[in-house]
Amino acid sequence: MSRPAATLVLRNAVVATCDRGPSDAGLLPGAAVAVDGRRIAWVGRDRDLEAEVNAAGAKVIDARGGLVTPGLVDSHTHLVFAGERAGEFALRCAGRTYLQVALSGGGIAVTTRETRAAPDEQLLAAAAARARRLIAQGVTTLEVKSGYGLDAPEELRLLRIVHQLGAALGGDATILPTLLFHAVPPEHVGDRAGFVREACASLIPQVARERLAQFCDVFVEDGAFAPDEARRLLQAAKDRGLVPRVHAEQLTAGGGARLAAELGCSSADHLEELDDAGIAALAAARVVAGLLPLSTLFLGSERYAPARRLLEAGVPVSLATNMNPGSAMSENVGLTLSLACLKLRLTPAEALVAFTAGGARALRQPDLGRVARGADADLVLWGCGSPEHLAWHMAVNHALVVVKHGRVVHEAAPAAMVDCR
Ligand code: NIG
């Protein structure tokens, strides 16, 4: 039988395949990965490489015992926005809650005003800089939400900017756009039902027709959307071929998780206030629970999502940064992994699988988030040899080499390397 050819080989690695269920990183010590073009051609023992793969002419990366994982899948981000919310952060440090700030005219409304006023180029440049910071930490797939335009013309503008972001990154990451209903636009608060009706009849069909988004997400919360409103929006989105998702049970137990189960959403994200009935509903419907511990930390709360109970109930979980100006102003991948362990009580292996295979599942991308023959060649070489080390040495960037579709898209500068191999 002829050996598969390789264009890129990573040798002498501890490979985490992340394809063996939620609690097993699938570690293969003394392993190698061969890539042919955009896909993984072979994974196996390093000593079998020559016999199994034709690597003549391939670029070879010696991992020197370092960990090689799938590229991270950041399945929940709000990268397109303008302005800052540092004043609101200070108010929250002084004791105000996120909901108090939001209900008194701050929060999302502030970012919406600043985002609407910003030109496309400014929004694109800021989003690209945020995306680059994530790529440099091993993220190779990013879900990016609209949601700071609120009304139809502005949401359409933001989704177009998300598409431009994909082009601006030149293929260095996969960008998956989401239409997010984040709040009722200020111009429509007097006629919420009319806004929802119009969005179902016009905005959602246009987004689907022009293929501006793959997902539709609704923030189900006091001050945002009620479950009935969200049901109408998500059903309309589903009818047009968009995959529904929900921001659920973040600040109050608003019923978002049960709605996600009822509608067959790909994920229900946040879940800090989730109860046992909600867990059972997600488990029965196989909805991915999106864990976003950076935002729980950033909001100064100790009520983290019940991740262990979710795992015990068999709910698939994902882990993401939720990068946004209001509840998680951070692109720190390492901190996200460590918080998942320290606060959500995931093992380091579970955190890694949630940030790779879990994210891919939330985004319905079966070829991403795992190291296996035929999967997309999205890979990260880390400057350490285990998932435990990644979570232990907290909030630094361990990524040394980031590969997207078989191409090296980032290499850590020597001065910035955290290399403990
Ligand atoms: O995912 N919860 C809703 N949306 C964001 C926060 C948005 C904001 O405050 O600007 C989140 O946490």
Image: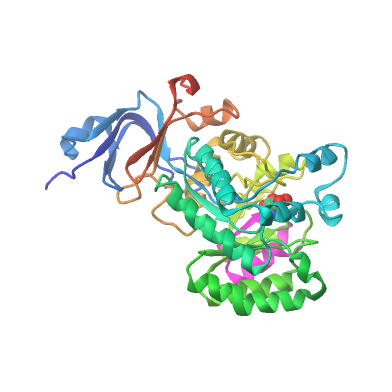
In this picture, residue 85 sits left or right of residue 290: right
> Depth check: 355 or 130 in front?
130
Which residue lies at the image location 68% right of the left edge and 54% below the top edge? 117
Name the outermost residue toward the left.
Answer: 1
Picture residue at 35% right of the left edge, 23% below the top = 64
In the rendering, at what x and y percent does residue 164 appear?
A: 48, 54
Observer-nearest residue: 267 or 397? 397
Rendering quarter of residue 404:
top left
Q: Is residue 332 left or right of residue 68?
A: right
Q: Residue at x 76, y 61 (%)?
A: 221
Residue range of the region highlighted in magenta in the rendering: 254-277
Residue 29 located left or right of residue 99: left
Quadrant of the image occupied by residue 394: top right
Q: Is residue 34 magenta?
A: no
Relative horizontal placement of residue 45, taking residue 280 as reference (left or right): left
Can see residue 16?
Answer: no
